[in-house]
Image (tube, rainbow, N blue to C red):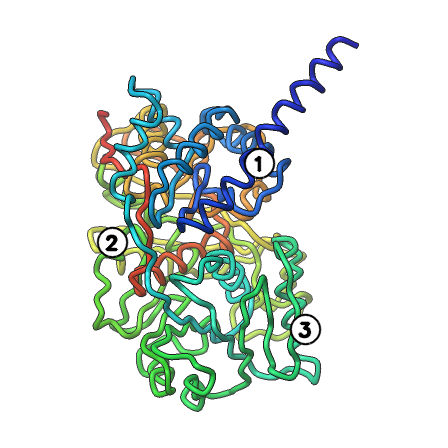
Amino acid sequence: MNDEHAHRDDWMVREELAERMVPLVGALRRDHEVVTSLHGHRLLGLSTTGIIELHERIAQLGHEELALEDTLAVLESLRELAPGASSIDVARLVAERADSDAPLGEYLREILAPAMGATPAEPTDVVLYGFGRIGRLLARILIAHNSGGSGLRLRAIVVRRGSENDLVKRASLLMRDSVHGRFAGSVTVDEEAEQIIANGTRIQVIYSNDPASVDYTAYGIRNAIVVDNTGRWRDEEGLSRHLEAEGVARVLLTAPGKGALKNIVHGINDATITPEDRILSAASCTTNAITPVLKAVDEAYGIVRGHVETVHSFTNDQNLIDNFHSGDRRGRSAVLNMVITETGAAKAVARALPELEGKLTGSAIRVPTPDVSLAVLHLTLENPAAKDELNDYLRRVSLHSKLRQQIDYVESPEVVSTDFVGSHRAGIVDGLATIANGRDVVLYVWYDNEYGYSCQVIRVLEVMAGSHPVVLPPRREVTLQA
């Protein structure tokens, strides 16, 4: 009975700590444009139990255990210091402060100096052309990011009318998702104005079959970035039709671009984006998942050659049951079969990382799961690697380096694919699965091919719009010997 009371008392203490965090997280976002997270997982919008669960989950995913008391102390100090617009990882602040003897307030004041006085970015109108799996997830992220009215503003979606009650059906698909759960908030429709209203954001629904025929200025939309989620056009000629529409300034494709289009993997080559780049590609989900890991390994060990095998969840392009399909094998039932197919991800890596040109081959297996995929990287290195050494390096890369928004790291004998649904990272290295035999290594990289990729697309959008916030604590260079 005493143990029962002790556990209950402990829970009540944790609950009270989490309850005190909720208004702090909201006030920081609302009053100062400060977004707080724990290892990339946002605190904004979480309930009391959600905050407690997040603290437990990050420990289960291999990060150092984080005490609720430490999180609360940092949030209270942030509220007092009142930094400007920024993205602040509380868990990393706590972890890195362990090496400092300075009082918390003094330590934070030094670390947060780049954010003091930082102002929110000017709003940039965003239009989603297509409203499928990626389009709806982008909408969810944009709506969540736009509570302050600055930065990226989702203004419209463009679709082909599917039925008389098309608007209601589109809103329902935004509200309910079989993989990612219910939308966090309220979704209603204004049928007269043909708008979806989500958490106070009015989204104009425009019906069109031709990108060039839309006059966005008629809806008050100007200098917009159009995100083409349809995959219907993949080269400059086809995508330039968007630029013929009134009110459009730039275009971003959520698929690998063809021809001379820049394929951008955020964290790798986003610095090459210039104001003159009017059409860009955010590459593919697999390219985004593996390129950062390959970059990190190449910097530390050098990659001679490699083969990428992707075990990929099925997509809408496949058939539910056997039926005609123009592609090889894809006509067979996606929910009943493993399907060998092609992937351009290995070659596409070189579009973002030219030093790996000609060094990689790739193939893919589509499997009967709806989301989360796995890339198996078979690599031959210039310098030999030991498993523990390689894993420690990739773990530190995931925590401190310039690639920490792209790479995560996990060591757990129990994790499976569904544990990574909703991951904000492009790819997650499974440390326990690593194989290292001298110069030959095998790495297993999980990735949410829907949500993780969508987060990468948003990061590219932020660079295009000049609205990416200051990220703190600052990134550190991570070397093999450190």
Alpha-carbon span between mark 3 and mark 1: 32 Å
Residue 382 vertical placement versus 276 (above, below): above
Residue appearing at x 25%, y 43% in the figure? 114
Give the image location of residue 324, x and y in percent: 62, 75
Residue 360 vertical position relative to residue 324 in the rendered view, above or below: above
Query: What label sits on residue 169 in the rendered view?
Result: 3
Q: Quadrant of the C terminus?
A: top left
Which residue is under mark 2? 353
Image check: 44 left or right of 222?
Answer: right
Q: Which residue corresponds to mark 1?
A: 51
Question: In front: 90, or 464?
Answer: 90
Q: Residue furthest front?
A: 80
Q: CA distance from mark 3 to mark 2?
A: 41 Å
Q: Position of residue 172 (x, y in %)?
A: 67, 67
Task: Report the mark closest to the observer, 3 or 2.
Answer: 3
**Secondary-structure class at tag 1:** helix
